Image (tube, rainbow, N blue to C red):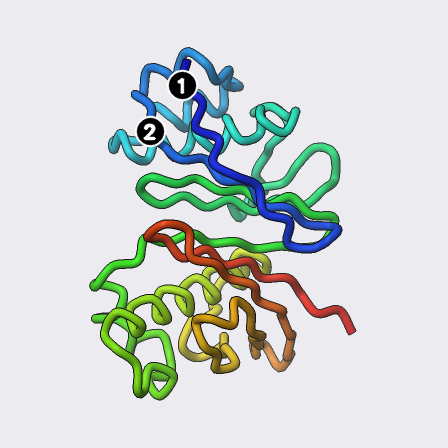
């Protein structure tokens, strides 16, 4: 029997992330993962098998922690929520799906570390944050910074937020595994604590609001 639950990661006492390594055939997920009619309909609209697997692996993670697809719903902006009132954030990339469950607002992102992210880095980050690094470390750091911005955007989920113009990370070393960031948008400034980790060849990022 396949079982590709990868690991859990305790972010803080209120927040845990869970990871699924996507190594099974699509038929395995379809046979093992009961879906609501709405989710079945969403699955049918996905053309890429990798997207279908990522979608279903998220539901496998829900099953792993004692929930089901019917416990998950989306608001009009596409933000996921849980029926039990806890906060959830979802991400998938290639061979991994991840979810974070928290009593606090939370945003996560998991990204394959790849050259393309470094090539487009000037579009979304302060390039001085990549100074004096090897190309490999620049690629890792650029991927983490992209994840920081994605994770914060997932928490706020507001149209008009620009990665380069509104979300600013405090500079960090990849070995730090944590930093902070600010969202400056609509005349408001919000602060976030950021934790990150390298999982195989993926960068995982978790953002949590710093409540004043």
The front one of 130 and 189 is 130
* Location of mark 2 (residue): 23
In the figure, 134 relative to 154: above or below? Answer: below
Q: Are marks 1 and 2 in contact (CB under 8 Å)?
A: yes
**Residue 143 lies in quadrant:** bottom left
The percent coordinates of residue 175 (x first, y second) are: 46, 71
Determine the residue positioned at 39% across, 41% down: 96
How packed is label 1: few (under 14 Cα within 10 Å), some, or many (20 or more)? few
In the figure, 194 relative to 20: above or below? Answer: below
Which mark is drawn over residue 2? 1
In the figure, 39 relative to 119: above or below? Answer: above
Determine the residue positioned at 65% across, 74% down: 190
Give the structural element (helix, strand or loop) at label 1.
loop
The front one of 53 and 179 is 179
The percent coordinates of residue 110 (x first, y second) are: 42, 52
Determine the residue positioned at 59% across, 77% down: 186
Give the structural element (helix, strand or loop) at label 2.
loop
Q: Residue furthest front?
A: 175
The percent coordinates of residue 208 (x first, y second) are: 64, 62
The percent coordinates of residue 116 (x first, y second) are: 21, 63
Determine the residue positioned at 40% across, 35% down: 21
């Amino acid at each position: 029997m396949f079982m590709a639950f990868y690991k859990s990661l305790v972010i803080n006492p209120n927040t845990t992330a869970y990871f699924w390594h996507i190594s099974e055939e699509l038929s395995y997920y379809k046979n093992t993962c009961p879906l609501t009619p709405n989710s079945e309909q969403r699955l049918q609209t996905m053309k890429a098998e990798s997207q279908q697997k990522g979608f279903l692996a998220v539901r496998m993670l829900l099953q792993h922690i004692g929930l089901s697809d019917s416990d998950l719903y989306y608001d009009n902006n596409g933000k996921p929520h849980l029926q039990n009132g806890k906060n959830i954030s979802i991400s998938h990339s290639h061979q991994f799906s991840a979810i974070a469950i928290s009593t606090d607002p939370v945003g996560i992102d998991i990204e394959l570390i790849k050259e393309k992210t470094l090539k487009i880095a000037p579009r979304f980050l302060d390039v001085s944050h990549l100074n004096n690094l090897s190309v490999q470390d620049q690629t890792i750091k650029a991927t983490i910074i992209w994840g920081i911005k994605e994770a914060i955007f997932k928490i706020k989920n507001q149209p008009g937020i620009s990665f380069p113009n509104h979300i600013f990370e405090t500079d960090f070393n990849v070995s730090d595994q944590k930093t902070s960031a600010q969202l400056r948008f609509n005349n408001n400034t919000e602060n976030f604590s950021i934790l990150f980790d390298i999982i195989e060849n993926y960068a995982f990022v978790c953002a949590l609001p710093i409540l004043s």
